[in-house]
Amino acid sequence: MNSRNTLMGVATSLMSVGLIATAPSAWAADRVFDLDEFTGVAAAQGLDVEVVVGEQFLVTATSESAEQLGNLKIRVKDDVLMVGREYRSDGFWDWWKHSADVSVMVQMPSVSVLKASSGAELFVEGVDCEILSIDASSGSDIEVVGFCDTATIDASSGSGIDLRRLQLKTATADASSGADINLNVTDAFYGDASSGADIDVYGQPAVAESDTSSGADIDFRGAE
């Protein structure tokens, strides 16, 4: 009995200093950011950000790593919620030091600007707006669900924008450098694709103007 108690005591001590691994969920932690009065979201540096249009402002981050949560840099600049990470003192950001998953949940009353860069993933639902600006670059992805009258869409450098579940009346889209845009528009579409980029247009817009160059494609798919 004494030996068993001794072993259990040793195991408890090892777990307390992190020498014995436990289930990831046991280490999950949250961090709440007291931020408000923003109408846009910009996600960067490989972060996974989910936005819901709701009644109030809420910003919460979740990770298995408390260190990752501590390295988050989330602030409001020019009415846009900037979601990123702290850089090293030399101005660079270590991808390999940020391998643990970090999810950021955002709730906001309305949205007018969406941006993603540097491998970030941005998912937005509940959109109901008149004008929306969407920009994705450097291998990032944006998906938006809802309704909007007019959208300006820009994708570059291998990024992807999926707007097939966003009902648009008018859209102006620009895709370059291997980027992809999928969108659903009913009234008017104006598009430009270059350098191996692709734009797929659904919804049979009454007005459709497009220009392509350098191996790019713009395809009109009709009703999906």
Image: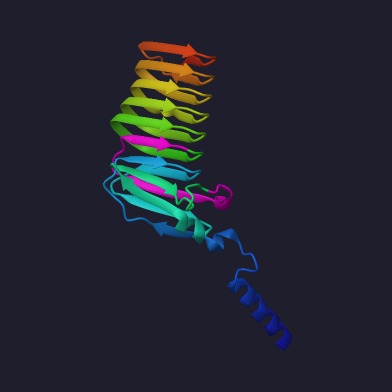
Residue 13 location, quadrant: bottom right
Residue 223: tell me if it is visible: no
Residue 178 is situated, as x and y percent measured from the top left of the image, at 53, 24
What is the residue that sits farthest to the bottom in this orientation? 2
* x 51%, y 26%: residue: 179
Residue 128 lies, with reference to residue 215, above or below; the image says below
Q: Is residue 42 magenta?
A: no
Residue 127: tell me if it is visible: yes
* x 57%, y 52%: residue: 97
Q: How many marks?
A: 0
- Residue 96 lies left or right of residue 137; in this view the side is right
Over which residues does the magenta segment extend? 94-117
Pick the quarter of the image with the N terminus.
bottom right
Residue 11 is situated, as x and y percent measured from the top left of the image, at 66, 75
Judging depth in this view, the residue of 164 and 79 nearest the camera is 79
Looking at the picture, the colour scheme in use is: rainbow
Judging depth in this view, the residue of 144 and 174 nearest the camera is 174
* x 36%, y 41%: residue: 41
Judging depth in this view, the residue of 214 and 121 nearest the camera is 214
Q: Is residue 105 magenta?
A: yes
Residue 33 is situated, as x and y percent measured from the top left of the image, at 36, 55
Residue 50 lies, with reference to residue 145, above or below; the image says below
